[in-house]
Image (tube, helix red, strand yellow):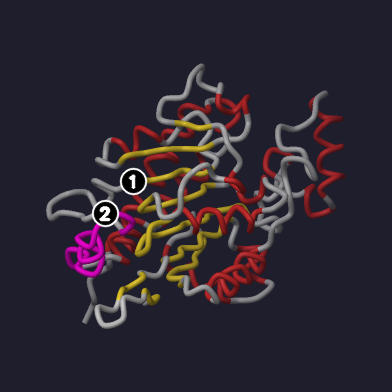
Amino acid sequence: MVLPRSRMQQFARLPRSWRLLRAFPLEQQQPAVFYRLLANDTATLLSLLWEKHHPAGMSRFATAANAGAGSVSANFENRDPLAGLKILDVGGGPGWFAAAFSDRGASYYSVEPDHAELAATGSPTSPCIRARGEALPFADNSFDLVYSSNVVEHTPTPWAMADEMLRVVKPGGLMVLSYTVWLGPFGGHETGLIPHYIGGEFARRRYERRHGHPPKNVFGQSLFAVSAAAGLRYAKHARRNGTELVAAFPRYHPWWAWPVVHIPVVREFLTSNLVLVFAKPVAETSQADGVSRVK
């Protein structure tokens, strides 16, 4: 008997991986084209993750939504899973991804610390605040879904940023980190597929000699060596506070290659980009004693 594939398996197929791989050179040459493709892919991925971890009308989360402010927003039948959600993009630049989420009915917000990135399209296309991911200017429990796409490797304190992202997620919401693993083929970013294996400084100097200017992502300043193991260690740290790691997989791989993240050492070279999906626990209040407890 052949079991039907899940919607995620239908999405994470080899043709998608090949399409994204072919698009990567466009990031430097035609950023608008590249980010439009990546934005639509990201919105679809997050939609499927939300649907997967909030199934059957999201009864658990709809109950939380009915409890009042500070809990996750309700989701209605026959709508995109992201419709009605309040979403924060940490490190979202000038809002490259805004249209992809707005088209799905979500309320999209972004933060970006780099003034040059904010001005990349002339003016931000969505509510965008200049701020650091390690110090988000939002109250606790403000967003249904908080995500960061390819930012972890560009900050010297990525796990402080992750803590902040969890802080501003509503109980019952999701926090999603996606980042480029240093020992994967794209760890060196525009410096090439191989030089960073010799060393980040070597890759930077080689790029300068070949192009006459420093790379956009300078090792030790705006590019850092982050491993897959470091992300999984952070997940153990987050679990102590009740946060659950509900998924970990290679972002651009077909679904049948996802188990590679469970193989130490090998995952550092073959994962390329790691996705970590966290679910923030729902605090329930006992009517008997009025005390909130984490579920």
Local SS, label 2: loop
* Label 1 Cα crowd, 10 Å radius (few <14 / some 14-19 / many 20+): many
> Which residue does the image show at 23% across and 71% down from the upper left?
4
Q: Which residue is mark 2?
A: 73
- The secondary structure that dominates the magenta segment is helix
> Which residue does the image show at 31% across and 74% down from the upper left?
285
Q: Nearer the viewer, residue 183 or 228?
A: 228
Q: Return the residue found at the far left.
A: 78
Left or right of 290 in this view: 153: right
Residue type, label 2: Ser
Quadrant for the N terminus in the image = bottom left
| Up-down relation of residue 105 to residue 28 (above or below) | below
Quarter residue 2 falls in? bottom left
Q: Which residue is mark 1?
A: 86
Circle 1/circle 2 CB separation < 8 Å: yes
> Which residue does the image show at 55% across and 39% down from the upper left?
24
Q: Residue 122 in the image: state x and y as whole percent.
A: 51, 16
Quadrant for the C terminus in the image = bottom left
Q: Residue 92 in the image: state x and y as whole percent.
A: 51, 37
Q: Residue 172 in the image: state x and y as whole percent.
A: 35, 64
Based on the picture, tell me whether residue 61 belongs to the magenta stretch.
yes
Sequence-wise first label, 1 or 2: 2
> Which residue does the image show at 40% across and 70% down from the upper left?
281
Q: Nearer the viewer, residue 160 or 262?
A: 160
| Up-down relation of residue 82 to residue 259 (above or below) | above
Q: Residue 164 in the image: state x and y as whole percent.
A: 55, 54
The boundaries of the magenta stretch are 56-71
| Up-down relation of residue 284 to residue 249 (above or below) | below
Residue type, label 1: Lys
Local SS, label 1: strand
